[in-house]
Amino acid sequence: MHINDIKMGAFVETFVFNQMKVNTFVLHNDCGDCVLIDPGCETPVEQQKLAGFLDENRLKPVAILLTHGHFDHVAGASFLVEKFGCDCWLHPEDEKEIHQGEDVAQLHNVKLSRLRHPHRYLNDGEIIQFGQFRLKVLHIPGHTGGSVAIFEIQNNWLFAGDTLVKGSLGFSNLGYGELMTHLKNKILPLPDETIIFCGHGPTTTIEQEKKSNPFFRRIA
């Protein structure tokens, strides 16, 4: 899937990788700056598909952002760090998920080249500038303790990880009480036209979720 904002010269390319069908997102612009979110490319074929797209479009990753540390969302991170020399960012509370990832991946017959540690931390509320992209970090613990959503301010794009799926919430390992509070305070106030890029499945919008998602209706 390819989404673009002609005025801003900004683009989102979506790839679906590994047996867990993780959405991997490439944010890029006319200048060739590129940010990767949740690189789930597990196999050499998948890794080459992503790397080939970057090479063909003359894109150089300036950062890898992980919405959380589960193995299916980080499967390609080590490969990409080695190939492109970019930093990898993660919320500090999910570093333990990275360390456990290789063992968990084996239970699902997924080969994971372990990312030894993140290079930088994502902190709640901070705004990170990558070229023209202004990305706000929203810490939303629930699926994992360090789960975050990434809001691209210029284009109203929300990369929700496994916090949301279209029409519902993702599975919460920490219960739903705190998660609902964070959704009310951090997600619900976003503009209705905000496009939500979920970690699995199709995209949606804040407006659509207000109309059809029972959890959104409850907190509204």
Image: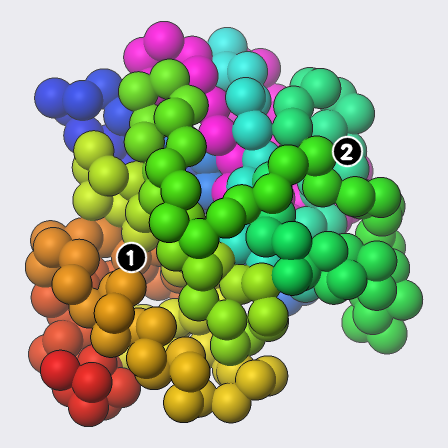
Q: Position of residue 113 (x, y in %)?
A: 85, 46
Residue in the image at 60% along x and 43% along y:
121
Q: Position of residue 19 (x, y in %)?
A: 67, 63
Quarter residue 85 falls in? top right
Q: Position of residue 78 (x, y in %)?
A: 77, 37
Position of 97 with respect to 99 (left or right) is left
Residue in the image at 54% along x and 21% along y:
62
Q: Can residue 34 be found in the magenta stretch?
A: yes
Secondary element at image label 1: strand
Alpha carbon of mark 1 to alpha carbon of mark 2: how far? 27 Å
Earlier sequence position, callout 1 versus callout 2 = 2
Classify mark 1: residues with Cα within 10 Å, few (<14), some (14-19) or many (20+): many
Q: Is residue 59 above or below residue 150?
A: above
Quarter residue 155 falls in? top left
Residue picked out by circle 2: 79
Q: Are marks 1 and 2 in contact (CB under 8 Å)?
A: no
Residue picked out by circle 1: 196
Range drawn in magenta: 28-57
